[in-house]
Structures are given as C-alpha cells and as structure tokens.
Amino acid sequence: MSVYSIIISIVMLLTTIAGDIGAPGLVDSLCDPGDLFTVSRLTESDRRRIDGESWKPGCPVPIEDLRFIKVAYVDFGGRVKAGEIICHYTVADDLADIFREIYESRFPIERIKIVDEYGADDALSMEDNNSSAFNFRFISGTNNLSRHAYGLAIDINPIQNPYVEESAGVVMPEAGRAYVDRSDIRPGMITPGDAVHKAFTSRGWKWGGDWKYQIDYQHFQK
C-alpha cells in the first residue's frame, strides 16, 4: 500500500470516529477510555468558562476548590463520547470512579456538559437532557442553596429521571412526564439497585428518588 493510500485510510478512519463521538472527543477516542477518568485542577481557560456563569462572587465554594473531570460515556445510540464535569474537590475522585463504573455498565446517558454551556440555566440544561454537577444556584422556589452550589450534587438524564411533586402536579423538565411511571422501565432511567444507583449509593451518596414528597430521580448528592 502506498503512503498516500495509508494517509487516506487514516483520514477516513478519523472522519468516521469524529462522526460517532463529535469533535471534542476525537483525540480521546484514540486512547484507552480508562485514561479519561481523571481529576485535575481548573486551568485558566476552565476558569474563564465558568466565571460569571456557574461560578459567581458570593459562591460558597472558592473557585480553587473546584475540580474538572473528563469522562467517557455511552449515549443512547451506543456511541462512546467524552463528557465534562465540574465538582467540589472532596467528591472528585468519587465521581471519576462512579462514571467509570457507569461507562463499563453501558448505561446510556444523553450528554454530559458543564452547565455553563447553557448559560448556567438549570432549566435549559434539563430540557436538553444534560447531566451536570456544579452550579451556584438556589433550590427552585426557595432561598436555600442547592447542593449543586457546593459542587456536591449531580443530575443524570433529567428527562428520563424527572423531578416530581405529585401533589402539585409539578414535573421538571416537562418532557419528563412520559417517565413519571417508574414501573415502565426504559433506557436511561435510574432504578433502585441498577448500575447507576449502586455506583453512587455504595460510596455514600444519597438518591433523590428515595425522597417521599419532592422526588428527584435524576439527583444524587453527598
């Protein structure tokens, strides 16, 4: 085979991979996905991305205490993609290990982007079925800080795992109404004893799906 043919073959291979995982994950796709589950301090570029968005003055967590995790995950089409998580340093190693377990289980996740990709708007992030962690915000309808504001909580597949207040008829995001019936188990739903539930609870995380009145199936916190 000529050098030219080899180059063309490599380009075609990279193009195919890019179509599966998207440009941000291209380089990572050529490595062992296990190498992606690492924790690092925020770079100056990372800080610029979140400053004034998910992190603002008055945040209970100094920006220096946040950590960046890059993970691999399997989407609903079975494609391996790269995701980004920002959280508090005390739970960073936990989350890296948890998402490695989730990846190995092939549990499907729609997308994992930092909430700053949505202007730190939790509603927009949920509507896009995005899984995210740190966000300096209050619990909806209250003056109480969310555990997300401390980087100690994460939401996974909000559409398949909605927030539900049954007595008030509240479901967030709205598309999650199709998943309020938890007896009809479909891909992406978190259920007691499944791979996601075990990965978190075995490390002492609490699941919002166990709450009695304001049930938050997408939510884990520590």
Image: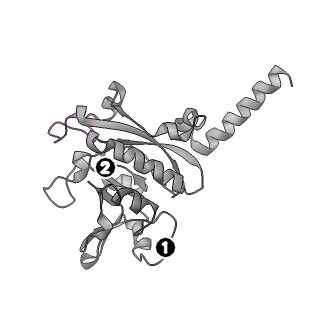
The amino acid marked with disc number 1 is Ile
Is 52 in the magenta?
A: yes
Disc ID at residue 121: 2
Q: Give the range drawn in magenta.
A: 51-62
- Indicate the secondary structure of the residue bearing disc 1: loop
Is 121 in the magenta?
A: no
Q: With 4 as the anchor, is 186 left or right in this view?
A: left
Q: Could you say which is closer to the camera, residue 148 or residue 195? A: 195
The amino acid marked with disc number 2 is Asp
Between the residue at mark 1 and the residue at mark 2, the CA separation in whole angstroms equals: 29 Å
Can residue 158 be seen from the camera position used here?
no
Q: Which residue is drawn at 39% across and 69% down?
A: 192
Label 1: how many residues lie within 10 Å, few (<14), some (14-19) or many (20+)? Answer: few
Closer mark to the observer between disc 1 and disc 2: 1
Total numbered badges shown on the rendered structure:
2
Residue extending farthest front: 202
| Residue 104 x, y percent position in the rendering | 53, 52
| Residue 199 x, y percent position in the rendering | 40, 57
Residue extending farthest right: 1
Q: Residue under label 1, please give it.
A: 185
| Residue 76 x, y percent position in the rendering | 55, 57
